[in-house]
Amino acid sequence: MTTTADSVTGTPVAIGTRGGPDQPTLRKDTWWVEPVVTVAVLTAFVVYSTWAAFVGKDYYAGTAFGRDLISPFYSPCIANSCVPGSHSFGTLPFWNYSPALLILIFPLGFRLTCYYYRKAYYRSFWWSPPACAVADGHRSYSGETRFPLILQNIHRYFFWILLIFNCILTYDAVLAFRQPYVVNGVEHSHIGISVGTVVLVANAAFLWLYSLSCHACRHFCGGQVKSFAKHPTRHKLWKFVTPLNARHMRFAWISLFGVAIADLYVRLVASGTIHDPGFHF
Ligand code: FES
């Protein structure tokens, strides 16, 4: 390693080092803001989603509220413990714990192995490296070639599983247009729109945008094709997803906030904390 100094600022610069927390950087801007904000937001989401997954209640606003709203953290609700009205996809009779514990492993696995989030949390949590032209926080680097990071390769399989979840959450968004009520013990329903409907529809739309902008999706559409002229359908699919892929980071954050807001909104309605304003036809 050679140490020199920047000719303008006099800042010492290490050349030929493999990094380390004691290595200086020439950057004078607030490069540290992005990793700090990333740590704060992702930590807040993990804390909130863990609490929401374990609490096991107030995830469904049904007939008692004149609504059919289920939290995305709890859908599909297939546990034995699911509240009446929330089982649209059958029941696993042996599972009496929180329904969310069966479900969240898939969306969390998808996000944890996402190429964008990998960049975000490698930089912000592991400082590997924290920003461009800032030394790595570690002196050695093995990439994703060894356990456990080699498991990041399963992202493409999570992509296919999450497409199923997106279909289920889209179905939930359609059900959110239903406003059930009971007359003489018989359930009827109006078709209507409420804030909860809008929240669940937006959540499903953001999740589709996040999934369709996934790098694995773009590779599936246009990868390993030597000539698009011979594969016109794949060329069309690739042209459709490429502009989405360019905005993947944006969709990653919007959908993360969207799913948390959808859970929180349903929770506030189902617990009776707020009324879900809306109308019916
Ligand atoms: S790369 Fe981010 S979801 Fe696939």
Image: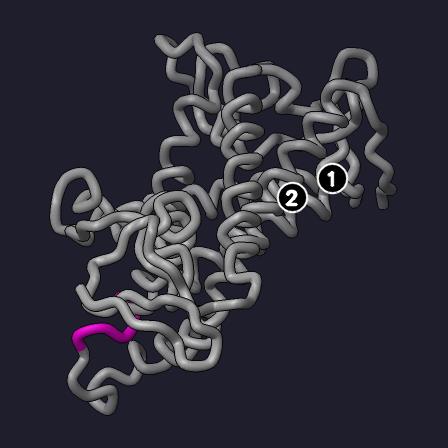
**Does residue 223 show up magenta in the picture?**
yes
Q: Dividing the picture into quarters, in which one does residue 41 lie?
A: top right
Q: Residues within 10 Å of mark 2 (few under 14, many from 20)?
A: many
Kind of residue indicated by mark 1: Gly
User: Residue at 43% across / 31% down in the picture?
Assistant: 104
Vertical order, 231 against 87 (above or below): below
What x and y, as percent, mark residue 137?
A: 32, 49
Between 275 and 191, the one lying in front of the other is 275
Residue picked out by circle 2: 200
Residue picked out by circle 1: 196
Secondary element type, mark 1: helix
Residue range of the region highlighted in magenta in the rendering: 220-224
Kind of residue indicated by mark 2: Leu
User: Residue at 40% across / 38% down in the picture?
Assistant: 108
What x and y, as percent, mark residue 177?
A: 71, 42
Vertical order, 270 against 5 (above or below): above
Q: Would you say the residues marked 1 and 2 are in contact, meaning their CB atoms lie under 8 Å apart?
A: yes
